[in-house]
Image (spheres, rainbow, N blue to C red):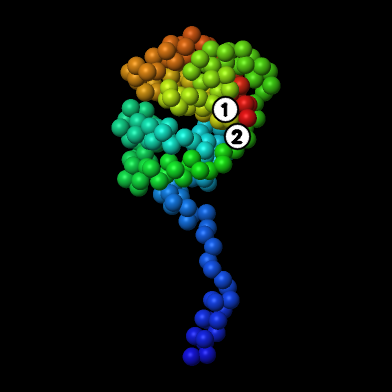
């Protein structure tokens, strides 16, 4: 009896249990994403995108496209299907609520300067700030890892990202007009914008 009384007294004095980082709605479902995208979507990788702070509409579109095979990725397809089953709205809301930190990957200042010149062509859709336009379904580019941006632009250039998507026809035409070196510079520029 004394042990039970002591235990109850200690619990009462301990106060209320505070919520931890996984108690936020959608956090537990999003945990599987952290293996590649980093905890709370803060990717430290040069080739994996930062999904912290991502707009829910864009997250849900990307997940649906991966799950349906429209955006081809053998790595992402099974995880996208898992997110759809786990509750895509909760996971999207969780990542949208995370404060986004720009990529820690450093870029050469000369590449950034060259990319700034090429970037003028991107502003029609992505805006002068590179923050995208939700009304057009255009995501932000700024602060993403340069390797990720470069790889995605090369996939657009080769029509291997969202093949046959008519909404991306102009983008793919633009990417085909750029050399691989210009694409790397463009990725460095957009990555450097905070």
As drawn, the residue found furthest toward the bottom would be 1
Q: In the picture, residue 170 is in which quadrant?
A: top left
> Which one is nearer the viewer's eye here, 77 or 117?
117
> Which one is nearer the viewer's eye here, 48 or 25?
25
> In the picture provided, is 112 more to the left or to the right than 75?
right
User: Which residue is drawn at the image coordinates 55% and 30% (left, top)?
Assistant: 144
Q: For numbered disc 1, what is the local secondary structure?
A: loop
Q: Identify the mark nearer the N-term, 1 or 2.
A: 2
Q: Is residue 83 above or below residue 108?
A: below
Badge 1, how many Cα within 10 Å: few under 14, some, many 20+?
many
Could you say which disc has been placed on residue 142 in the image?
A: 1
Could you say which disc has been placed on residue 57 in the image?
A: none
Q: Position of residue 142 (x, y in %)?
A: 57, 27
User: Which residue is drawn at the image coordinates 52% and 32% (left, top)?
Assistant: 47
Q: Are marks 1 and 2 in contact (CB under 8 Å)?
A: yes
Camera sees residue 124:
yes
User: Which residue is drawn at the image coordinates 43% and 19% (left, top)?
Assistant: 156
Q: In the picture, residue 105 is in which quadrant?
A: top right
> In the picture provided, is 118 more to the left or to the right than 134?
right
Please give the residue where the numbered disc 2 appears in the rendered image: 102
């Amino acid at each position: 009896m004394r042990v039970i009384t002591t235990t109850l007294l200690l619990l009462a004095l301990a106060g209320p249990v505070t919520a931890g980082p996984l108690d936020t709605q959608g956090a537990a479902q999003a945990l599987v994403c952290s293996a590649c995208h980093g905890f709370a979507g803060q990717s430290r990788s040069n080739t994996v995108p930062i999904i912290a702070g991502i707009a829910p509409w864009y997250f849900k579109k990307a997940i649906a496209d991966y799950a349906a095979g429209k955006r081809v990725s053998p790595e992402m397809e099974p995880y996208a299907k898992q997110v759809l089953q786990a509750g895509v709205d909760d996971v999207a809301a969780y990542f949208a609520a995370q404060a986004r930190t720009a990529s820690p990957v450093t870029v050469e200042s000369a590449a950034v300067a060259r990319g700034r010149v090429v970037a003028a062509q991107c502003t029609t859709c992505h805006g002068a700030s590179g923050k995208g336009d939700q009304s057009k379904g255009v995501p932000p580019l700024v602060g993403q890892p340069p390797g990720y941006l470069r790889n995605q632009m090369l996939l657009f250039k080769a029509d291997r990202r969202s093949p046959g998507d008519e909404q991306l026809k102009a983008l793919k035409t633009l990417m085909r007009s750029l050399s691989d070196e210009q694409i790397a510079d463009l990725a460095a520029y957009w990555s450097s914008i905070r």
